[in-house]
Image (cartoon, rainbow, N blue to C red):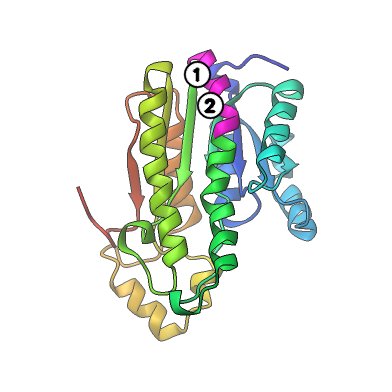
Amino acid sequence: MTSSTSASRIAVVTGGIGGIGTEICMRLADAGRQVIAVDLATRGERIEAFREQVSTYRGAIRFEPCDVSDFKACGGLIEHIERHIGHADILVNVAGITRDTSLRKMDPQQWHDLMRVNLDGVFNMCRHVVEGMTSRNFGRIVNLSSVNGQTGQFGQTHYSAAKAGVHGFSMALARETARKGVTVNTVSPGYCDMPMVAAVPHDIRQQIISDIPVGRLGTPSDIARAVVFLTADDASYITGANLPVNGGYFMSF
């Protein structure tokens, strides 16, 4: 276990394999962080593709398996990192799933399956890092929410509820840790150029884009840059905030 300095802080990124998560890992590594990408061990081919993609970072990004919906597994992960790698200074919770269906067709299992990953996973990881962060008087936690946590979306009562809950959780935790040098914020992506949006019929996708004031879909880099900003050492006066990255699709104050 090694102590951390500003230049070598360790960042743990859940949902680190693929898309936004991988981009966040790379951007954090570019900023000099040692990055632990966390995802399910069962994603074999994608893990190998990830390792190939980040091979140029020469060990600055590594993979550790964990199911964030499992409280004990999250505890074991953080214990392993603290014992063998160093202090977990930065936590970015990206892991999440979508299971779109209208409430009239949704069964309790569908609701609970999504909540276990999208909301319980945030609790599980934060619970296991927050004590160490507060004892060291430094920590940066960024939880990914969603524009749909603010606007709602058809077929996403569970997803929208979870993402709204993520920000409520983050604000409350921010109050608990503010005097201990630990900031807690959310980033809320809008519509991004990702496989889920690409699968939408062309005419609907064009309508979505036309409703975005900047006139384009977001990119993983747009989201990653926001995360890196909030995890910086000198972002110490920003906590309990939600940073919307949606091209103006939803505006509030």
Label 1, residues with CA under 10 Å away: few <14, some 14-19, many ≥20: some
The disc at residue 198 is none
Q: Nearer the viewer, residue 233 or 104?
A: 104
**In this figure, which residue is indicated by the disc labeled 2?**
130
Question: Could you say whether the residue bearing mark 1 is in a helix, strand or loop?
Answer: helix
Say which amino acid is labelled 1: Thr
Above/below status of 69 relative to 176 = below
Q: Main secondary structure of the magenta part?
A: helix
Q: Quadrant of residue 34?
A: top right
Q: Which residues are magenta?
A: 127-137
Q: Residue at x 55, y 22 (%)?
A: 131
Q: For mark 2, does the 10 Å Cα neighbourhood hold few (<14), some (14 to 19), or many (20 or more) residues?
A: many
Return the x and y of residue 203 as percentages of the image width and height.
39, 85
* Residue 134: numbered disc: 1
Q: Position of residue 121 (x, y in %)?
A: 58, 46
Residue 229, located in which quarter of the rendered image?
top left
Do we see residue 33 in this rendering? no
Residue 103 point in image, percent of width and height: 44, 74
Q: Is residue 133 magenta?
A: yes
> Is residue 184 shown above or below 242?
above
Mark 1–mark 2 CB contact (< 8 Å): yes
Residue positioned 42% across, 66% down in the render: 157
- Evaluate whether residue 54 shows in this view: yes
Disc 2 element: helix
Q: Quadrant of residue 215?
A: bottom left
Task: Name which residue type carries label 2.
Answer: Val
